[in-house]
Image (spheres, helix red, strand yellow):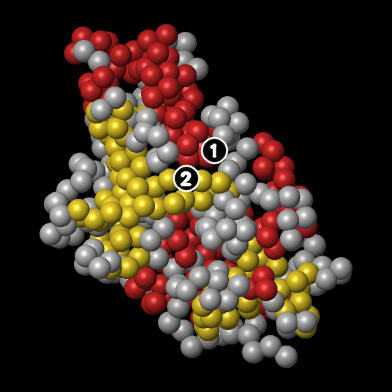
Amino acid sequence: MFDFDVLVVGCGLSGATVARVLAEKGYHVKIQERRNHIGGNMYDYVDKHNILVHKYGPHTFHTNDKVLFDFMNKYSDWEEYKLTCGAEINGICTPTPFNYQTIDDFYSDEKAEKLKKRLENAFPNRTTITVVEALNCADNIVKEYAQFLFDNDYSLYTSKQWGVSPSEIDVSVLKRVPIRLGYETGYFEDKYQVMPKTSYTDFFVSILDNRNIKVELNVDALDYIVLNSDNKLIIDNKTFDGAIVYTGALDALFGYKYGQLPYRSLKFVWNNEKIKSKQDMPVVAYPQEEGFTRIVEYNKLPVQVTESTTYAVEYPLQYDPKKNQEPYYPVLTSKSKEQYKKYLSLSKGTDNLFLCGRLADFKYYNMDQALKKALKVSEQILEFLYNKK
């Protein structure tokens, strides 16, 4: 009845990973992608100025897990790339995560040295802390510094990025960017920090290059998939008892039965200037500016020798599925997490439905976290398919 054993909805990292693992085990996999390209939000391309850009915002792969790093190396050649970022506060571009340079940028020499000692006394043997910890510190000098960062960066950026007040957002979001107790730079601290030598799109071409994988672009699987009253998956009016891997927004799969889950989208305003450099770092946040959150300069991501620079100004906005937008980030609040649990409970009523990815799992995954989950789901599907025989 069907010429495939597994249907994968979405051709991003999660979907492509599951597809390749299952294909290598001999299963026939069909991937349906509603966009006109492979790679999901990792998709990159060379623009008309001959600069490699990331269509949906900057991506670098970083992990401490050698298993995940080795998996990525099977399908592409990678080179070390340590991302540096900054935030412009009161006209000064200071490193992020904030470090001792930040203290030097905004304090006199005497006050800066005093603050560093107080931080080290309050948090002995630590190299990083969260802004939440610093705000709750018993030392008032440390607390004042944390309040300065919160008022001029964390709170402003959070409000713009997520569209809710910092008090509503899940505390895990505020903890994503730490405060460093030292002069170390670089956005991440993972052992492996890389970018592809050619492009992410080339990586996806490689991982999908298997005779058991068929990719269909410009196809919205939700136009063909329904769940009947018995929680059976119906594709083109026929019951499908193979595995379906769903990587999209879970509320859409269930027809928004419990209302729309909140996701944030982005509007990118692309620019090219006949200059070598727009800003000191590839990614700079502008928490105090109106409307936009950051500027990403792509001739620095990776480093490219160019005669001009292409950069994107990112404006966050509330995702509306009725408009031509992409959902990028789940908005994690106590209310939204309870709402998601209802959809997750519905999904568990269908034994051949497997969820995977940032949208389907309603989690703010990094790439390595998404990859780890995809490999775990692959094992679950293999067990399901084996037991079905």
Residue holding disc 2: 316
Residue 74 image offset from top left, x and y in percent: 37, 72
Whether residues under marks 2 and 1 lie with C-beta atoms below 8 angstroms apart, the answer is yes
Foreground pick, 112 / 268: 268
Q: Is residue 321 above or below residue 21?
A: above
- Left or right of 223, for residue 145: left
2 or 1: tag closer to the N-terminus: 1
Side (left or right) of 84 relative to 132: left
**Residue at x-position 42% and y-position 8%:** 140
Label number found at residue 163: 1
384 up-or-down from 252: above or below: below
Residue at position x 66%, y 65% from top?
354
The quarter of the image holding the C terminus is bottom right
- Residue located 27% across and 43% down the image: 84
| Quarter of the image where the N terminus is located | bottom right
Q: What SS does tag 1 mark?
A: loop
Give the number of marks: 2
For this rendering, which residue is in front, 321 or 177? 321
Whole-percent x and y of residue 170?
58, 35
Q: Amino acid at mark 1?
A: Gly
Q: Is residue 175 left or right of residue 97?
A: right
Q: CA distance from mark 2 to mark 1?
A: 8 Å
Horizontal and vertical percent position of residue 388: 74, 79
Q: Amino acid at mark 2?
A: Pro
Mark 1 surroundings within 10 Å by alpha-carbon count, few (fewer than 14), some (14 through 19), many (20 or more): some
